[in-house]
Image (cartoon, grey):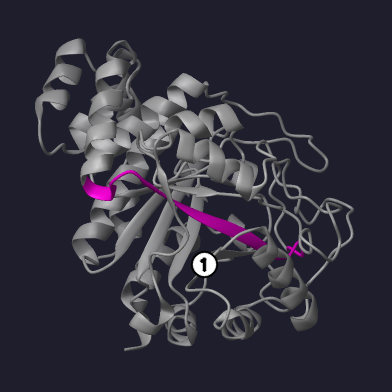
Amino acid sequence: MDFTESFNHRNWNVLQSRIYAKTADDVELALRKDKCDIDDFMALVSPTAQARMEQMAVMSRHYTQQRFGNTILFYIPLYLTNSCINHCIYCGFSHNNHIKRIILNDEQILREVEAIKKMGDFQHILLVTGENPRDAGADYIENVIRLLNPYFASISIEVQPLKEEEYRRLSEAGLNAVYCYQETYHKERYNVYHPKGMKAKFDWRLASFDRMGRAGIRKIGLGVLIGLEDWRTDAVMMAQHLRYLQKTYWKTKYSVSFPRMRPYEGNAFKPNVVMTDRELAQLIFAFRIFDHDIEIALSTREDRTFRNHLAGLGVTSLSAGSKTDPGGYAVYRNELEQWEINDNRTPTEILSDITQQGCDVVWKDWDLRLQRN
C-alpha cells in the first residue's frame, strides 16, 4: 500500500481540531522528548507553542549544529521554461496568463550556466520548469542533465511529476534530487487552486513520491505552499507523509521547504492564509525538533533579514542570486518571472552576511561521480 491509499482515510477537519486543541502540557511534553512523534509535532506547530518560541529556537539551533555544524549550503535555480499546461490560480506560469512562453535550447542553457558560474562557485543547481510534458518532458530534462553534468556536482529538478521509469532514467543520467510540492494536502479544496491540467490530478501528484522512492532517487524534497489552506494542518500532513517515506524508502535523504506565496504575473489570487515571520520560524523550529537530520531549505521568497536570522537556527540550505524566469541570468533578463524575488542580494553579498552570522558557506557537498560508482 502506498501513501495515497492510506492518505485517503485521513480527515482534514479531524486533524485540524486535534492541532488546535493542544495544550501547554502537550507542548512541554514534546519539548522534553529526544525523539518526537506526529502527536508531538502537532503540539509544536499549534498556536499554544508560540509561548515557547525561545526554547524551540535554542533546541533547533542545537540539533542543527549537532547534525550539520555551522554550515549553509548554497544552491541556485535554473528556470528552463515557463511553458505550462496547468491553470493554477496562484502562479505566474499559469496557462491562463498571456505571457511570452519560452523553452530554452542547449545554446541558451549554456549561456545561463556561463552567467551562473560568474556569480559564484555554485555546484548545486536546481532545474525548474512549468509543466509541459510534450515539449519539456522527461526527454528534454534528461538532455539538460547530461548537458550540465560537466558543470555541476549535484543536479536537482523541480518539474512535473513523472513516471517511475522516467525518474529511474533521469537518475541514471546524473540526477541527484527531486523536489515536488503537493501545494496543499487538503484534497477537498485542492481543485479550487488547480482546476485544469495534469496538476489537477491530486492522487497522481501525491503518488509521485512513491514513484521517486521506488526509482531510487537519492534525495526527495517535500513542500507545501503557504497561503492556500491552514498551514498548521498542511504541515502535519506533510510530516506524516515524510515519516511514511522515511520508513518505506529508508536509503533516501529528505528535504522540506515552506514557500510563502509571493506576487506574480496577473496577481489575481490573494492568499487565504497569511503566515507571519514568527509563525514561519515556529514551523522551521518544529521540523528541526521533530527530525534532527532533515534538510530545510529557504528560498529568495523570504527577505534578507529573515534568511540571515534563520541561518544556523534550523535552515541548512539557501538559494542565492536566484532568477525565476527562463533565461533570467543572461538570455532574457527578468521578463517572465514566476514570482517576485524578495531577496535581491548577489551571492557575494549573501556569503558576506551569512559568514558574519558565524556560518560557513558550502558550495559543494556531493559529486555525481559518487552516484555513478
Q: Which residue is drawn at 20% across and 19% down?
A: 27
Residue 322, placed above or below residue 2: above
Percent coordinates x, y for residue 315 in the rendering: 40, 41
Report if residue 79 lies within the magenta region. yes
> Which of 327/87 is in front?
327
Percent coordinates x, y for residue 9 in the rendering: 30, 47
Report if residue 255 lies within the magenta region. no
Q: In which quadrant of the rendered image does the N terminus lie?
A: bottom left
> For numbered disc 1, what is the local secondary structure?
loop
Q: In which quarter of the image is residue 42?
A: top left
The count of marks equals 1
Where are the magenta residues, as a range? 67-84
Label 1 Cα crowd, 10 Å radius (few <14 / some 14-19 / many 20+): many
Q: Quadrant of residue 107?
A: bottom right
> Which of 347/324 is in front?
347
336 left or right of 259?
A: right
Percent coordinates x, y for residue 318 in the rendering: 50, 47
Q: Which residue is drawn at 52% across and 73% down?
A: 162
Q: Which residue is drawn at 60% across and 56% down?
A: 200
Magenta stretch, overall SS: strand
> Which of 314/255 is in front?
314
